[in-house]
Amino acid sequence: MKIDLTQSNPMIDASDLAKLLDVRASDVIGLMRDGAITSRFESGIDEDAGTHRLTFWHNDKRVRFTCDDEGNVLKTSRTAAKRGA
């Protein structure tokens, strides 16, 4: 799995995200437009320089991807969490 960091906003394949959020891949873009899926992108500093974190929330799920500067996913986590937590 890889995250495209070459765009102004990081991009991940909808099917990869859909599996982890328990939604259909074809619904991901619409859910994002409607604000039902939200996200945050962070870049590491100091000892975390060279890594990035992309987090998505949908209903009671939080999915977080940690990747390197090339977009290679180093770690993926999925937890139950409140939106924005």
Image (spheres, rainbow, N blue to C red):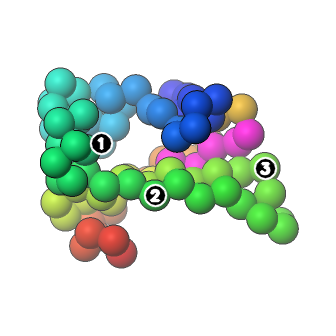
Q: Which residues are magenta?
A: 65-69
Q: Residue at x 33, y 71 (%)?
A: 84
Query: Where is residue 76 drawn, in percent x and y?
Result: 48, 47
Query: Where is residue 14 drawn, in percent x and y?
Result: 32, 29
- Vertical comparison of 17 with 2: above or below: below
Q: Which residue is mark 2?
A: 40
Q: Residue at x 63, y 44 (%)?
A: 67
Task: For residue 82, say whether it is visible.
Answer: yes
Q: Which residue is mark 1?
A: 20
Depth order, front residue of 72/43 = 43
Look at the numbered disc 3 and give the secondary structure of its residue: loop
Residues at marks 1 and 3, CA–CA distance in whole angstroms = 25 Å
Q: Residue at x 71, y 60 (%)?
A: 44
Residues at marks 3 and 2, CA–CA distance in whole angstroms = 17 Å
Amino acid identity at mark 2 = Arg
Residues at marks 2 and 1, CA–CA distance in whole angstroms = 16 Å
